[in-house]
Amino acid sequence: MIEEIFDNIERAAADGVARPVRWSPWVRLLHRLGWARPRAIARPAAAQLIRTSLDRTDYEDAYRMELLPGLPRDPAAWTGILRDAFPVLAQAGGELLLDVNTAGLTARASILIDERYVTLSTAVKADGLRARLYWGVAKRVHPFMARTMFRRTHRTLALAAPSAGERSRAVSLRASATGSSDAG
């Protein structure tokens, strides 16, 4: 941790780090195991797109994780939760609505970002017998898969986010650029 702190200081003071510290396999494993897990919550009131996307629902769920410093605040950056495999239906007010229809199911997924959290919500409507049979099996594994994919994407985006030193340097560079353009 001390080496990472010194790396961040060097990033803030200079353009980068010549030889950044590398995590050992043991540290990487502990980091992966200790990563926060999504919490099941009631669907947020702010998730208006998913609330109005289906006339009725046979299944609903929502999971929330805290937004860490440096994580993207644009819901479109979070579509990797679902492997970028589904079309975007709408985006408004920090929420993105995806069309995740499959096997006769009418399903929607919503990614909502507010000041502190990112929330993944799902709404499913089984349209016929085949869809009800499919969903009868799929709903057993859906919560596990949704939380696993959400957690993986959260961790991937967090590890790819700029470090504290890089964010600090970017802020100071923007401030100096703004100050020099104001003076001119």
Image: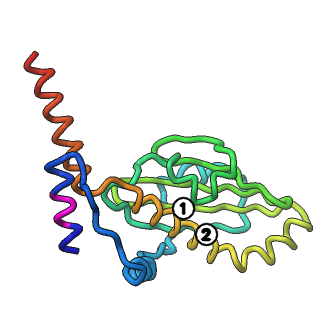
Badge 1 crowding class, 10 Å Cα cut-off, few under 14, some 14 to 19, many 20 or more, is many
Query: Which numbered disc, 1 or 2, marks the residue that appears first in the sequence?
Result: 1
The answer to whether marks 1 and 2 mark residues whose Cβ atoms lie closer than 8 Å is yes
Describe residue 97's horizontal placement relative to residue 93 as left or right.
right
User: Which quadrant of the figure contains the C terminus?
Assistant: top left
Determine the residue located farthest toward the front in the rendered image. 18
User: Which quarter of the rendered picture does the N terminus lie within?
Assistant: bottom left
Residue 64: which disc? none
Considering depth in this image, is 176 or 82 the residue closer to the camera? 176
Q: Quadrant of residue 34?
A: bottom left
Magenta segment boundaries in residue numbering: 5-9
Q: Main secondary structure of the magenta part?
A: helix
Q: Could you tell me the amino acid type at mark 1?
A: Leu
Please tell me whether residue 163 belongs to the stretch shown in magenta: no
Q: Is residue 6 left or right of residue 96?
A: left
Picture coordinates of residue 110 (x, y %)?
58, 54
Q: Position of residue 94 (x, y in %)?
A: 46, 46
On the image, the x and y values in percent for residue 104 come to: 85, 59
130 w.r.t. 37: above or below: above
Q: Position of residue 173 (x, y in %)?
A: 19, 37
Secondary structure state at the residue bearing disc 1:
strand
Q: Residue at x 27, y 61 (%)?
A: 19
Q: Which residue is mark 2?
A: 146
Q: CA distance from mark 1 to mark 2?
A: 8 Å
Tell me the SS state at disc 2. Answer: helix
Residue at 60 percent across and 48 percent down: it is 97
Find residue 81 and report its image quarter. bottom right
Amino acid type for the residue under numbered disc 2: Ala
